[in-house]
Image (cartoon, rainbow, N blue to C red):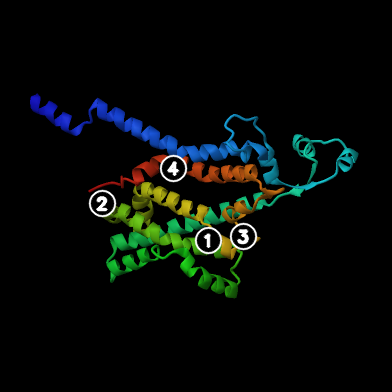
Amino acid sequence: MTDLALQQSVVAASPRGKTFAAVVVIAYALIAALPIAWIILTSFKTQEDAIAYPPVVMFQPSLEGYVNLFTIRSRQTPEFIASLPPAQTWYDRDVRKRNLVIAGPSKVVPRFINSLVIGFGSTFLAVFLGTLAAYAFSRFRVPMADDLLFFILSTRMMPPIAVAIPIYLMYRALGLADSYLGMIVLYTAVNVSLAVWLLKGFIDEIPREYEEAALVDGYTRLQAFIKVVLPQAITGIAATAIFCLIFAWNEYAFALLLTSGDAQTMPPFIPFIIGEGGQDWPAVAAATTLFVLPILFFTVVLRKHLLRGITFGAVRK
């Protein structure tokens, strides 16, 4: 009994250790969440409160930033505004108080849709191709497999700005600049190396005996892959998808260089949200808040797979 208690005392953390670990984790979480919380609060400030010094913590909430984000406004004289018909919506009344009128919608919705299409499209392709390549490296004898894997990984070592100009010239010659296809192909090419390396580790942990049993039962190699390997590799696929989406969603350099209109995503669009007399910080904060929501939702939905995936929680032999 004494030996058992000694073993438990060595393996299990003491109550004081658990308390200390909990305090450290909570403190880290609060520090990490503070910038996001400040951005969200700024999105509900007026321009005056957003640039006030010292910073304003207690303020009257306002939707001015969101109105400015989704609309284009023009300044008019009080006489012109008085001659207009009564405002029909609350945001019309809000902007008229500042001697402004709404001239039309802004470009934030098309840019947001571009981010969704390019981000999720490239993530799907990168994970799809990465899963097939990782399965081939894991299950078949590929000549010079180690060299090929190192070459695939080496593509992640090069900073994007180093190849930005050649890619720009190539895309301009091929007509892929400022297009969905061009950005999806580019982000897929960058992410597929990460997908191969992550997924190969997961597939290596799935016992071959499961596939061999399926083949003996009459399954083809493709059927065994779909019905046996994929369900057990779903944890790794989900974790890989999150990492690939984060890169494609936040990528700035290529998006700034290769897009300007039809395919422009949110990262290069947000910094150029200009207000009257300078940067419209509440609108920038509102755009950032909305931009974070899809990736946050996607991560929360797959959080169980992510927590298992980053610890390589696949089936072990």
The one of 182 and 231 positioned closer to us in this rendering: 182
Q: What residue would you read off at disc 3? A: 263
| Mark nearer the viewer, 4 or 3 | 3
Farthest residue in the bottom direction? 173
Q: Residue 102 vs residue 151: left or right?
A: right
Say few, some or many: other residues with alpha carbon within 10 Å of mark 1 (under 14 / 14 to 19 / 20 or more): few
Q: Residue 72 vs residue 196: left or right?
A: right
Query: Is 230 above or below relative to 63?
Result: below
Whole-percent x and y of residue 24?
34, 34
Whole-percent x and y of residue 44?
63, 36
Mark found first going from the N terminus, 3 or 2: 2
Q: Amino acid at mark 4?
A: Leu
Q: What residue would you read off at disc 1? A: 253
Q: CA distance from mark 1 to mark 3?
A: 14 Å
Q: What residue would you read off at disc 2? A: 207
Say which mark, if any, is on residue 302: 4
Assess whether mark 2 and mark 3 are in contact (beta carbons under 8 angstroms). Answer: no
Q: CA distance from mark 1 to mark 4?
A: 28 Å
**Residue 52 visible from this viewpoint:** yes
Q: Secondary structure at mark 3?
A: loop
